[in-house]
């Protein structure tokens, strides 16, 4: 049993070690049990359990070796009785041999299923990368970094999204969270990002970009049936950083507010002046989008995140507070900021996150950085 406060990784490592050695321990325990009990007691349950445990968790070779070892152990415990060919001895030996063969068959079935699952995961990962490609490290003169952390290990498909695009109006950014999971969420992610890529180039204002995304999700909703279509929505933050303007414009559609990290460690939470509905909820009412304009000095970093970060809880139910964590700290680059933040969130939850997490950081280089790059 895990001790209080013990990291999840340590517990998992111990369980895996126990699973690996358990078949051998069962065989040894069977031999000891047989020698410590009268003849009419049997250790067959120990010898049959060993290969069955090894089958789904070990390689074919290990499973076959375990089955052979169990059969040899069955022979050894009967040697002291002269291995009389009575019906009990024959039955026990045939039972262990049958289970050993069955374990090899089970191993092959499990391995085949694992290969299919690995293939499915590779396809899912390729789809995720196609929908959410890694942004360039520098876009339109700004330093950029993105991070996607899936709640489940080995899961690649989720509803978080981000995109960064250099446009005639400046560098435009979107980060959002689609309600739901699986392929339906990925379809909505593809719709939002596709609409953003097009609107970011064509629309003169950030409000107009938000409206294009709203209409794109509305069209998608008419093609989808059921409860998911009726209740689907996407929280999102859109940002615009004019080239050389020293400002950032933000439209927030029901999303956690971005953070603005100053070069000296200061921090501002960019809470929207007026609340707004998420994208895809236009049927509930019409509210005009309001742009929030904030100074964006040299060396400052704009951090956008999904609620997978701000709603990550520890074992006592305490939320992770990115603003409190980052206040007074200075990071060399956006990629360092995101790596540190993701690591601290994992340690806060001890690896027990329940929601995907997307992070995006955009930094306006300082004057000294620009001089060095030149």
Image: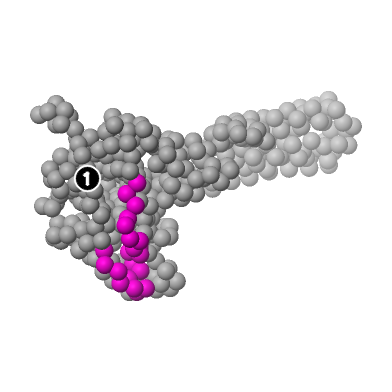
Find residue 260 and report its image quarter.
top left
Q: Is residue 215 above or below residue 311?
A: below
State the residue at coordinates (30%, 72%).
286
Majority secondary structure in the magenta region: loop
Please state which of residues 126 and 227 is positioned toward the viewer in this rendering: 227
Residue 324 can be seen in this image? yes
Report which residue position mark 1 lands on.
295
Q: Is residue 124 above or below residue 38?
A: below
State the residue at coordinates (67%, 30%).
24
Report the magenta residues as a range. Answer: 269-289
Return the x and y of residue 298 as percentages of the image width and height.
20, 36
Return the x and y of residue 80 as percentages of the image width and height.
83, 25
State the residue at coordinates (82%, 37%).
42
Find residue 71 and report its image quarter.
top right
Q: Is residue 290 above or below residue 351?
A: below
Please state which of residues 351 and 133 is positioned toward the viewer in this rendering: 351
223 left or right, relative to 99: left
Please state which of residues 119 and 331 is positioned toward the viewer in this rendering: 331
Return the x and y of residue 117 as percentages of the image width and height.
45, 49
Badge 1: few (under 14), some or many (20 or more) residues near its Cα, within 10 Å? few
Return the x and y of residue 216 as percentages of the image width and height.
26, 67
373 left or right, relative to 79: left
Please state which of residues 82 and 352 is positioned toward the viewer in this rendering: 352
215 left or right, relative to 257: left
Give the quarter of the figure containing the N terminus. Answer: top right
Residue 130 can be seen in this image? no
């Amino acid at each position: 049993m895990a001790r209080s406060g013990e990291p999840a990784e340590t517990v998992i490592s111990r369980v895996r070690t126990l699973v690996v050695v358990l078949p051998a321990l069962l065989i040894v325990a069977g031999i000891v049990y047989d020698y410590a009990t009268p003849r009419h007691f049997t250790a067959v349950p120990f010898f049959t359990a060993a290969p069955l445990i090894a089958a789904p968790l070990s390689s074919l070779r290990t499973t076959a070796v375990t089955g052979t070892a169990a059969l040899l152990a069955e022979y050894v415990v009967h040697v002291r009785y002269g291995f009389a060919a009575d019906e009990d001895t024959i039955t026990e030996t045939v039972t262990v041999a049958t289970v050993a063969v069955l374990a090899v068959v089970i191993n092959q079935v499990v391995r085949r299923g694992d290969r299919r699952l690995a293939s499915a995961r590779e396809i899912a990962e390729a789809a995720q990368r196609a929908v959410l490609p890694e942004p360039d490290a520098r876009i339109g003169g700004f330093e950029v970094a993105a991070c996607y952390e899936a709640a489940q290990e080995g899961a690649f498909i989720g509803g978080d999204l981000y995109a960064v695009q250099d446009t005639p109006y400046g560098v435009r950014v979107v980060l959002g969270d689609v309600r739901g999971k699986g392929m339906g969420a990925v379809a909505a992610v593809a719709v939002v990002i596709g609409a953003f890529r097009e609107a970011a180039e064509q629309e003169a204002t950030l409000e107009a970009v938000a409206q294009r995304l709203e209409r794109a999700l509305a069209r998608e909703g008419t093609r989808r049936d059921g409860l998911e279509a009726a209740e689907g929505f996407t929280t999102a933050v859109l940002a615009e950083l004019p080239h050389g303007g020293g400002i950032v414009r933000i439209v927030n559609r029901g999303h956690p507010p971005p953070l603005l990290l100053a070069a000296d460690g200061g921090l501002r939470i960019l809470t929207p002046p007026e609340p707004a509905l998420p994208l895809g909820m236009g049927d509930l009412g019409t509210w005009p989008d309001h742009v929030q304009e904030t100074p964006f000095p040299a060396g400052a970093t704009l951090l956008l995140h999904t609620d997978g970060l701000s709603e990550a809880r520890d074992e006592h139910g305490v939320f992770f507070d990115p603003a409190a964590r980052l206040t007074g700290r200075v990071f060399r680059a956006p990629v360092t900021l995101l790596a540190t933040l993701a690591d601290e969130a994992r340690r806060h939850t001890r690896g027990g996150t329940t929601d995907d997490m997307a992070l995006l950081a955009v930094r306006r280089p300082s004057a000294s950085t620009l001089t060095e790059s030149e």
